[in-house]
Amino acid sequence: MHRRQFLRAVAGTAALPTAALAARDGDARRVESEASPVANATATRDGSVATATPSGTPTPTPTDAVATPTSGYEPLGSVAVAGATEAVLTPDGDTAFVAVGDGFAVLDLTDPADPTVVTSERDISPPGTTQRMGGVRDVKYDDGRLLVGGPAGYDPDSFYGVALFDVSDPTDPGFLRAYETAYPVHNCDLAGEYAYLTRSDRDANPLLVVDVGRDQPREVARWSVLDHDPVWETVPQQLRTLHDVFVRDGFAYLAYWDAGTWILDVSDPADPGYVADVRERDPETLAALDGLAVAREYSEPPGNDHYAATDPDSSLLAVGKESWNSNFGKEGTTPGPDDPGGPSGIAVYDIADPRSPEHLSTIDPPPTADPNVNGVRTTAHNFELAAGHLYSSWYRGGVAVHDLSDPADPERVRYFRRSSTTSFWTAQLAAPGETVVATSYYDPSDPDAPARVYTFPDVDRATPTPTPGRSGATTAPTGSGGPATDGGGDGGNAGADGSGDGGGSGVGTDAVETGGATAGDGPGFGPAAALAGLGIGAWRLLDGSDEPGDEE
């Protein structure tokens, strides 16, 4: 099976207003997300922003169902990895590198049913300093090298910056070099010889571009929304925090919280250039806020762009929002018309023309019984677009897979949720038709339990079957069933047209969560069989994994 490499960005949130934050990265009660209306604003060629078009906003109350269970889908395996958050994979999908707070761990995934930790690098202290890396929530892999960034938040005892390792032999990582910064590195990305860092300086909050290909890494560029338009200086810095960066095919995608998601041309990494932005708030509206209104705006929708990523051919952009009820609304608990609360979903855009993003759809978050800041959070955290699907983590809302064959109408085809024992940080595809990897960073039923890295089966995919032809043979795809659903029942046997005993309507019954735990045995994924015509050849062509320069 041909497999490709994936980059994903991470993690919690950088530089938050203290009034809005009860807990953040590393705290077992922290960010787990909530919903938001996802609106769209498309940037025009002259740099102006078109009118936002919001989608519907879920407004669950504590009596609402918190899970839509399905059956028939369970993890293949799991392994305890203390401190695990973000994970990235090698191109063959056989190895995962996992951020673990004070460094990284290396996992062998050759047997997905039995993932194992083969080695780890902890207590990383780069030459020239006595400090050690801490608060590591993000790692990025590219062409046999691993970038390790941190700390995710302010920590005077930690080394601030990134360290680069040679992991061409995953069982024997070798330190290459480090770059020290004056501020936390909440998230990062690695593309070729350049590292892209979120510089959490509580001022301009710029993107920092560092040449890490040389023996002595050096900064080559920095870019901020303030560079594009000085009006952003009037906006409280908490609302224009650069939370994450994703780089692919010469473009960088910056999740700038309430300032929206910005697209830069980084074909010349030393000279980033503005391309477009999508956002739900204009700087004048944000600048007029003060006091608790800032904390509420930070916490609640609209806005709150937390993570952005594209599909392999850079035709689709997904933007995940992170929001939850700030407790500043009526009665301090239940969201209402004047207190939108959360959680937020994932907005999908057409970026075939990156200068003019077009909003296509919004994927709603799993429901929650308690959308408050310290409640049961179900906002999307990190995710992956690969092989025509979106692989997403939703904190205590679980792990989901959506078919993007029609990106204007994404279809959820897999879903796993165990709100009482898991809270997922990341989800991504390891191998098409084989394995999905997801990290649960804590167990709500036992905050002292170690984090776990889970493996799940991917959606079923057709395999080509040779059939005789005049010149020997032709390839005719043979599917393993009809379109995948996340239906109830026991998974059943779907027919090629979607018929059969696949669980009836394809929608499971709701289970009500009480006290943060899902009642009953809990949900799973459903029966499979999506993309019936996609064979390995098509996977290579569509995913671009054989293309040079697609290593991000």
Image (cartoon, rainbow, N blue to C red):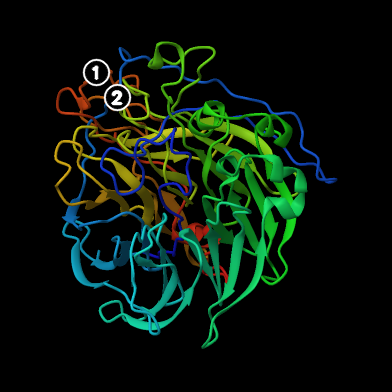
From this view, report whether residue 442 is shown above or below residue 418. below
How far apart in space, not on screen, are marks 1 and 2 (Cα)? 7 Å
Residue position for label 1:
512
Give coordinates of residue 494: x percent, y percent: 31, 32
Does the image show residue 159? yes
Locate residue 169 relative to residue 404 in the image: left or right: left
Residue position for label 2:
67
Q: Mark 2, residues whose alpha carbon is within 10 Å: few (<14), some, or many (≥20)?
A: many
The residue most toward the bottom is 215
In this rendered view, identify the residue nearer to me: 247 or 273: 273
Q: Mark 2 is on which residue type?
A: Ala
Q: Earlier in the sequence, mark 1 or mark 2?
A: 2
Residue 360 occupies which quadrant of the picture? Answer: top right
User: Are the residues at dot 1 and dot 2 in contact (C-beta closer than 8 Å)?
Assistant: yes
Q: Mark 1 is on which residue type?
A: Val
In this rendered view, identify the residue nearer to me: 547 or 444: 444
Give coordinates of residue 479: x percent, y percent: 38, 45
**Element under label 2?**
loop
From this view, report whether residue 318 is shown above or below residue 282. below
Task: Give the residue drawn at x 20%, y 58%.
Answer: 81
Task: Give the residue drawn at x 21%, y 26%.
Answer: 518
Locate residue 459 relative to residue 266 in the image: left or right: left
